[in-house]
Amino acid sequence: MSKRKITVAVTGLNNIDSPGPGIPVIRALKESAEFEVRIIGLSYETLEPGLYMHDLVDKSYSIPLPSSGMDSLMSRLEYIHSKENIQVIIPNFDAELHSFIKLGNRLKAELGIATFMPDLETFESRHKSVLYEFGEKNGVKVPKSKMIYSPNEIHSIGNELGYPLVVKGKYYDASIAATPEQANNYFHKISNKWGLPIILQEFVSGNEVNITAIGDGNGNCIGAVPMRKLYITDKGKAWAGISLLDEELLTIANRVIGNSKWRGGCELEFIKTKEGSYYLLEMNPRFPAWVYLAVGCGQNHPEALVKLALGEKVTPFTSYQNGKLFVRYSFDQIVDISEFEKISTLGEL
């Protein structure tokens, strides 16, 4: 049976030491059993490696930063769509999702471009700053946390939560502070990079286990694959991991996605304590950078997302392969300066 041809635009092409999910999502789509996918890469920086991976990305365009506003983004997407006839867009950065969610209806109505993301209310409900309330609502344990705007708040909240505690940015970055002085340093370091607020979170000791999952927006979990990190970089990113058979973790993930009626891909990050309790640390509102492990385990989540975006019925995955490893690696890609100049000056490659 011949595959259906489709054009999908994907962001998150920064396949670096803190990688975006774009390249793994693209790899998954290129291995789709149902679609022959033409990939349009959407980039924010001229040195995002995915721009130059021509075996994966068929055409690339620069798009304005989220801080430029939705009108600027919409205008740019209209131009790209006029050239490429995009059917589906998959955004992969936390910071851009707010804009894409707000533009979702316009993209569909005016351009015929489908997306598959949570609505704004659901998206906001799992922010780090309100995660404790999210956990209570969805029946999952969450470490206590407080949102702060000034380092002057560290003293009293540090006494309340105890040390060590975790200092987190609104979107990215987290560091463990053993003292108020360390917490103060991390506050400035993270806020200078990602802005305010900063979240102070109770530290829970144990092993980190994550799940990549996808919900259909009606309370059904279409697929879920748990993973334990085997090698972690100094930025806390998994550089190697192994799929796990963990029924309790899958039950929790199904409950969270079911209760919240999550729509789209997500990553649930947990700590499993020595006593066997699971604490939800974060719910990231998009696929993780290790989502390709799910493909290797027999569940192609990005392909399922495209089908859901197109309004097609998707049968939930019922199994996956346990004991599959992913091992990430660095690769020196040789690029001609003319390509860099082209994306820098024309915004296209």
Image (spheres, rainbow, N blue to C red):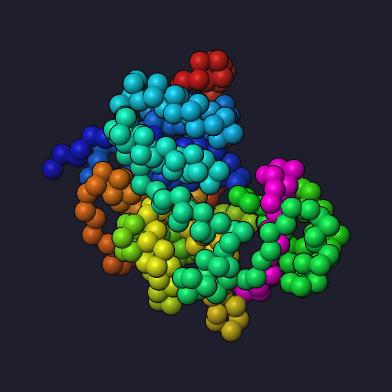
In this picture, is 272 found above or below 264? below
* Residue 198 highlighted magenta (yes or no): yes
The percent position of residue 25, horizontal first and vertical second, equals 41, 45
Q: In the rendered view, does 62 fall on the left or right side of 320?
A: right
Q: What residue is shown at x 26% (from left), y 43% (from top)?
A: 310
Query: Can you tell which quarter of the image residue 275 is in?
Result: bottom right
Query: Of residues 261 and 295, which is closer to you in this image?
Result: 261
Nearest the eye: 320 or 211: 211
Q: Quadrant of residue 208 in the image?
A: bottom right
Q: What number of labels is visible?
A: 0
Viewer-closest of 226 and 257: 257
- Give the magenta-colored segment's residue range: 190-207
Q: Confirm whether residue 128 shows in the render.
A: yes
Q: In the image, what residue occupies the spot 43% across and 43% down?
A: 101
Q: In this view, does 267 lie to the left or right of 18?
A: left
In which quadrant of the rendered image does the N terminus lie? top left
- Return the x and y of residue 67 as percentages of the image width and height: 59, 34
Q: Does the magenta stretch include residue 178?
A: no
Percent of width and height locating residue 237: 60, 54
